[in-house]
Amino acid sequence: VLAAIKELNYTPNAAARTLARGKTGMVGLILPSLFDAFMTDVMSSAEKALKEKGYFMAVTTASSAPDLEELGAANHFIGDRVDGLLIMSPLPDNSFILELKKKSIPLVLLDQHQLNLQLPTVTVDNFYGGYEATKCLIHSGAKKIAHISGSSIFESSRERTAGFLEALRYHGMQVDEEHLVNGDFTVMCGYKTTRMWLDRGILPDAVFASDDNIAFGVLDAAREAGIPVPQRLSVIGYDNHPFTALFHPSVSTVKQPAEEMGRYGVDLLLDIIGHKARRTGRTVLKPAILLRDTTR
Amino acid sequence: VLAAIKELNYTPNAAARTLARGKTGMVGLILPSLFDAFMTDVMSSAEKALKEKGYFMAVTTASSAPDLEELGAANHFIGDRVDGLLIMSPLPDNSFILELKKKSIPLVLLDQHQLNLQLPTVTVDNFYGGYEATKCLIHSGAKKIAHISGSSIFESSRERTAGFLEALRYHGMQVDEEHLVNGDFTVMCGYKTTRMWLDRGILPDAVFASDDNIAFGVLDAAREAGIPVPQRLSVIGYDNHPFTALFHPSVSTVKQPAEEMGRYGVDLLLDIIGHKARRTGRTVLKPAILLRDTTR
DNA sequence: CTGAAAGCGCTTACAG
DNA sequence: CTGAAAGCGCTTACAG
């Protein structure tokens, strides 16, 4: 009989097994975009970790509340197609999450706390990252330090900005209004902001960019204008985008433990699924400052 | 009764429905890496198209034959968890595919033909892309044209190189051995190759890079060495990486119809699943040459 | 047109 | 320890 099984290379029917056992063998990942380097890192790490445990990963994007609602809609409900969900999308509206909670679907939030929801979370200490990045800029002697933030719908972005402001405050420094810019995690926004500074003659000494895309844009504008980096302008980004280490000058950045976030998020979720962990608790990972050639 | 359904926001059990109907409502995507801009574009487009049709997407990476075998292994078989599979990973070894074929699992190959397998494919005309990119370089007056290829396990890379060689041949030109470099789709390889040319005093007039990562590396090395682009060195990449349009100078490239590949691949696969299309046939998409500031 | 029954292909608790 | 039966929660073909 076993020989025959090998012979016909029989595979047990997954749907029947799922129905009988109540486990799908799939884990869902909901994230805002497939184009962001950090998110892709986390996704890749999660995929690897899941594969090692014999799980498959269902990926779906949702960047807004309506997108999430749609995933909760009748004939497109992701909840019971998976054993649990890793959620990286910002949750301005919680009704989708509440529905999942009500159905007791195991959930882990990635890169955001959402304190009111009492859900297990895996985050990076963005306040610390923003604070330390700014401190390095201050210690290198910069007097006029600027910050270009990411989109404020991301908790991570808001906290980096808070860390930046606190570092300045602690060191008795101020930031000019024109040097505190609400950006959006794009190269374009870094470029345009720097051009604006250049045009108005208010280029700062140093910039803390809320992600590496922004930093690339700042560096591009500086290079085009012949501004020496890091002598005249220091730049530090965030994420450790693969290109930061490869370009010349290499770009200083704050490395997020993306690999760890994906792996730990998976471990935690699988423990919850297997009733080996509680459905609460915060895990905060530390980022690492990587000083390279765009800072003094 | 219907009111009660709304009330308790009931969702039918997916596993039971799958078992009864024989449809999972999931489509699998197998790709070599989550870090490549083109692949991410295709994935994103496929995800969007699938979502519109009420399907979810299971993503799994496999870059080598053993990886694929693993997906065919007993307790990790992806075949019956999905209604069909979109396969972007190179298939040097076909046994995994043969197994899927034997089980009649709908399959669409993306970005590769694999003629011997008689499977429906959606590809881009890479020979044409390589030929046209090179022709543009020739027409701009370049005499010494170099090429840095991607990894030869990719059919797409091999065909771009073939297009490059044919364009030279057709125009009665030759390529020096040192200017035909086997690379690997990385910034590092573009950078190192260009440095090597510089160090040996054999910098070409123009480079056709098999992807934009390589082109970024070439441009970075040229900038560092003070080589004027495009006056002394023209560069054209491949993929239309988001950064190519944003950096200064903007990077000439060959735009792959990634969005179309993802969307069309999904449409075709769903038609096969719904018995509305045959399990054969080639669809070849045309790339578009985007001449920007790194070519004359 | 409605409603009860069989069947999808497993797993697991239970009888032998 | 082995094997037959019940059950997982739907869908669909069929009887009424």
Image: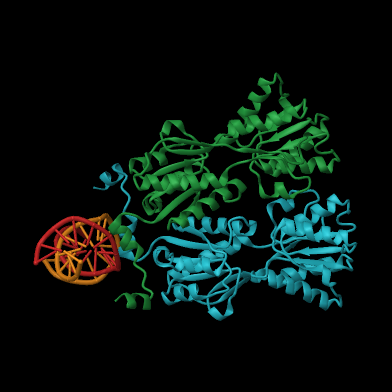
Chain colours: A green, B cyan, C red, D orange
Which image quarter holds the C terminus of chain A? top right
State the image coordinates of residue A30 (x, y, percent, origin top left): 48, 48
State the image coordinates of residue A124 (x, y, percent, origin top left): 55, 37
Q: Is residue A226 above or below residue A175?
A: below
Residue, far top: A172
State the image coordinates of residue C2 (x, y, percent, origin top left): 19, 58
**Quadrant housing residue A26:** bottom left
The residue nearer to you, when weighing A285 against A242, is A285
Give left or right: position of C5 versus A85. left
Residue A33 seen in render = no
Q: Name which residue lies at 77% across and 26% down.
A: A144
Give left or right: position of B48 versus B168. left
Residue B60 seen in render = yes
The residue nearer to you, when weighing A243 against A226, is A243
Give left or right: position of A67 versus A195. left
The residue nearer to you, when weighing A214 against B89, is B89
**Quadrant housing residue B219:** bottom right
Q: Name which residue lies at 74% across and 71% down.
A: B161
Q: Name which residue lies at 39% across and 62% down.
A: B24
**Quadrant housing residue B89:** bottom right
